Image (cartoon, rainbow, N blue to C red):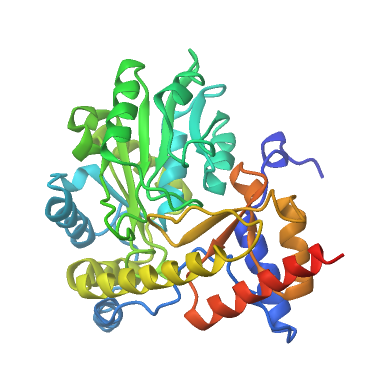
Amino acid sequence: MKLSKRVEKIQPSATLSVLGIAKKLKGEGYPVLSFSAGEPDFISPKSALDAARDAIDRGETHYTINSGIPELKNAVAGYYSRRFGLNYETSEIIISSGAKPVVYEALQTLVDPGDEVLVFAPAWVSYVEQIKMSDGRPIAVDTSETGFVPTVEGVESKLSPRTVGMILNSPNNPTGAVYDEATLKALARLAEENDIWVIFDEIYERLVYGDTKFVNILNAAPGIRDRVILINGVSKTFCMTGWRIGYALGPKRLITKMGDIQSHFTSNASSIAQWAAVGAIEGAEDDAERCRSRFAKRRDILVSLLNGIDGLRIESPAGAFYVFADVRNTPIPDDIEFCERLLSEKFVALVPGAAFLAPGFVRISYACGEDDIREGVGRIEDFLKSKRAR
């Protein structure tokens, strides 16, 4: 059977692949500790669960408006008004089955064959593949030597007449870097000067730590609103990954076209999940802060323990729930081999940096319990000690 050239170019999600292998081994009885998952391990907030049950009892089990129920759009608009002082009409908001589909719909709306889109490496695995699926060309801007934060010079070196847009992710997956106001202003200026759009993925915006402040790009540069698509959802902030609710905010004309694509793609997001998201956004502020505080504690534990391992180099992440560790000075400098052997020998699952356009690094998620963090880091240290002893 002939397969399309498009699908032959697509690589499977490395994060989901590692997670699948880890779950399989655990199901077979092996003592696997997974640091690969990109999801909080806490249960969804009570307000979300109650709202879902109420929706079921009311019989909210049918198709909804394709772009999302009005109640959820209003909740999202209210959230952005309260949190960022940004006022969006419901016609400028689309609800989808997770944040991933709205990124895809935005790219499908904005990218023509051969168009170039800048991504800042290390970058989330699906950006590159979704750009390819839109027949565009992903152009990586390396940030590994600048604290995982892009510079004007780095961006300018990658701009070309074919550049149509850039995807920003702050706090960043996989590095945990948070872009400051000056950086966002500089990137916004480049977008305006070069007439390119910006997808601003802020799915981890509530998960920042210490003195770090999250900055929405439109608070830094309100003048570029007409060229910005904001991406967010309830998965990370409200521990609702399985509910699959994401959303985008942007210019009405673009959001309308994204809705047209969605009507032929996924149709509406789950009706019950949408009502659960209303419950979370309107009633789970305290739950979100408790979640953030617990992640902050886990981050401190993980960073402290990893800093004690010879050869492993890390930067303390300011946001999200990942540490991106440099393994190039360890006895196994190849990140893919490092992860494969660590999983097979010590049953610890990490994600290789090559999946994020950053070979030589590994992503360690601290979306797991404190005891697992201590045990897992101990296994990593034993693993590396055994390689040095040979």
Q: Quadrant of residue 61?
A: bottom left
Across and down, in percent, residue 198 comes to 36, 32
Q: Is residue 372 above or below residue 274?
A: below
Among all residues in the image, which is located at the extreme right?
Answer: 390
Closer to the camera, 244 or 357?
357
Task: Please give left or right for residue 316 compared with residue 122 in the image.
Answer: left
> Considering the image in quadrants, where does the N terminus appear?
top right
Closer to the camera, 327 or 178?
327
Total label count?
0
Closer to the camera, 331 or 111?
331
Task: Please give left or right for residue 69 compared with residue 100 in the image.
Answer: left
> Considering the image in quadrants, where does the C terminus appear?
bottom right
Q: Is residue 103 above or below residue 372?
A: above
Which residue: 24% across, 80% down? 58
Task: Please give left or right for residue 116 compared with residue 279 in the image.
Answer: right
Across and down, in percent, residue 174 comes to 51, 52
Which residue: 75% across, 41% down? 3
Q: Is residue 356 above or below residue 372?
A: above
Across and down, in percent, residue 8 comes to 73, 40
Closer to the camera, 347 or 163?
347
Among all residues in the image, which is located at the extreme bottom?
Answer: 29
Across and down, in percent, residue 38 comes to 50, 63
